[in-house]
């Protein structure tokens, strides 16, 4: 028998609506559950008027490559039952704490949303941090004598649920709340770390696409949102979460795991790492989007080789599964609808290289006792880009062979080559956490490649 289950969702943005809500709606339509979502607006600015006008109903359009074909699939979502602005109706938010049908608490408050602020006051809601609001909500639920809920944050930080729990525990101490409440929080609530993966571009940015999709939908929808067909949600397996949600493919693929670290590592290295590695060379060679890169024979081969030789073998012993994910990743890169700009991915490229590429580089070197070819080429182009930066008023411009682009990063990285050398850059432990010249032959090979690049030769 299908039971009613209510969901408190902090965040009304495109990602949650095209990912979590679409998944819950799919379960409803498959007859596997009956979820009702209450959206809570996390910040004061903006309006929920569109939700009110459309009775919280909207459409998700998944566009892209699926099984080697271009697709445009439309899904009508009606699992959202209300959208609450706690800055205008705080009481309704707290009423949900006393609703025994609430089972899930989902959030996407950006990476900065899960934080602790010792200046938050218990009576200052809603003008407090997200974890502070949750603490007060839980305290009301505790006082109502109800069971806890399952927390499934999707914020893009490591151990997102654990970080939320730590903040809540700090507020219990800060506000001198009863120890019985702390015990209840520890034993009755389940904080499940999650990993999410779907590119969502949101509302159409150009009038032609808007008109095209409106025609497909059949009516005006000011809440329509666009995403890619691929979707993956890995959820830490705690309590009875598998009896509430369903694994397998329900529009997105859901996996329950006692340890989600493999999936995190796989996404960071394969998807994000290959993204980061392809951007500098692709920008230098005149490309504009990831799709452009994948349609270029030489660059697509570079991406293939980077994955095949330098990244995939060092993710897991389960090479077959990682290869499958790598193939799906390349199919996603071929999405003709996303218009994924290389300049957008290039944001903070130095820190991204450290987090996303350097771990694969180190693993390759440790196993083979030599530097990886394609990651080294990618790094050489990265250094070339940053060494060609000049300042124009408050912006930083990189001079490429056929154009100029604005580059955004920490000021210290943008201005590094104004008075320092490539050797300084690679030896700087404050940037990399280690001396990159400790990899035998790395510095010499980078210099060799940069010399060829600056002579106008293609290194690929």
Image (cartoon, rainbow, N blue to C red):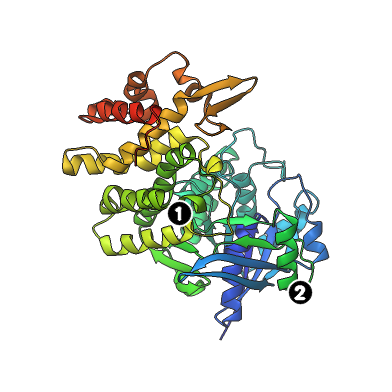
Residue 191 makes an appearance in the image:
no
**Mark identifier at residue 218:** 2
Q: Secondary structure at mark 2?
A: loop
In this rendering, position of residue 82 left or right of residue 101: right
Q: Secondary structure at mark 1?
A: helix
Disc count in the image?
2
Give the farthest residue toward the top. Answer: 419
User: Residue 15: where, in percent of width, then height?
Assistant: 60, 57
Residue at which label 1 appears: 294
Q: Is residue 111 above or below residue 84?
A: above
Q: Is residue 264 above or below residue 58?
A: above
User: Residue 153: where, in percent of width, then height?
Assistant: 53, 54
- The quarter of the picture where the N terminus appears is bottom right
**Mark identifier at residue 96:** none
- Place residue 50 in its image quadrant: bottom right
- The quarter of the picture where the C terminus appears is top left
Residue at 31% across, 64% down? 321
Residue 355 makes an appearance in the image:
yes
């Amino acid at each position: 028998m299908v039971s009613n289950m209510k969901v408190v969702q902090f965040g009304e943005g495109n990602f949650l609506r095209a990912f979590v809500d679409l998944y819950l709606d799919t379960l409803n339509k498959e007859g596997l559950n009956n979820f009702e979502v209450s959206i809570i607006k996390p910040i004061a600015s903006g309006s929920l008027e569109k939700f009110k006008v459309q009775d919280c109903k909207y459409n998700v359009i998944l566009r892209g490559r699926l099984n080697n074909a271009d697709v445009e699939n439309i899904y009508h979502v009606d699992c959202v039952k209300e959208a609450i602005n706690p800055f205008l109706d705080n009481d309704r938010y707290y009423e949900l704490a006393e609703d025994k049908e609430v089972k899930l608490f989902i959030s996407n408050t950006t990476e900065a949303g899960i934080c602790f602020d010792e200046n938050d006051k218990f009576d200052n809601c809603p003008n407090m941090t997200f974890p502070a609001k949750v603490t007060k909500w839980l305290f009301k639920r505790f006082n109502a004598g109800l069971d806890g809920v399952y927390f499934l944050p999707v914020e893009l930080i490591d151990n997102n649920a654990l970080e939320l729990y730590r903040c809540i525990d700090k507020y219990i101490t800060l506000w001198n709340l009863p120890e019985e409440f702390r015990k209840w929080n520890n034993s009755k609530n389940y904080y499940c770390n999650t990993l999410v993966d779907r590119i969502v571009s949101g509302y159409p940015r150009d009038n032609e696409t808007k008109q095209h999709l409106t025609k497909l939908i059949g009516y005006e929808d000011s809440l329509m949102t666009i995403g890619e067909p691929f979707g993956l949600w890995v959820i830490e397996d705690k309590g009875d979460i598998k009896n509430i949600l369903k694994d397998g493919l329900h529009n997105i693929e859901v996996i329950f795991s006692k340890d989600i670290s493999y999936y995190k590592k796989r996404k960071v290295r394969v998807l994000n790492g290959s993204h980061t590695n392809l951007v500098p060379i692709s920008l230098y060679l005149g490309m504009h989007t990831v799709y452009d890169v994948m349609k270029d024979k030489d660059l697509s081969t570079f991406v293939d080789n980077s994955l095949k030789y330098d990244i995939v073998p060092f993710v897991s012993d389960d090479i077959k599964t990682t290869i499958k994910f790598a193939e799906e990743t390349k199919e996603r890169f071929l999405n003709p609808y996303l218009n994924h700009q290389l300049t957008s991915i290039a944001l903070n490229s130095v820190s991204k290289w450290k987090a996303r590429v350097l771990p694969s580089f180190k693993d390759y070197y440790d196993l083979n006792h030599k530097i990886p070819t394609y990651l080294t080429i990618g790094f050489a182009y990265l250094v070339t880009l940053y060494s060609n930066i000049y300042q124009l008023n408050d912006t930083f411009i990189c001079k490429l062979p056929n154009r100029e682009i604005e580059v955004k990063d920490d000021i210290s990285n943008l201005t590094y080559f104004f008075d320092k050398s490539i050797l300084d850059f690679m030896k700087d432990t404050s940037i990399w956490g280690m001396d990159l010249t400790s990899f035998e032959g790395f510095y010499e090979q980078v210099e060799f490649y940069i010399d060829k690049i600056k002579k106008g030769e293609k290194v690929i």
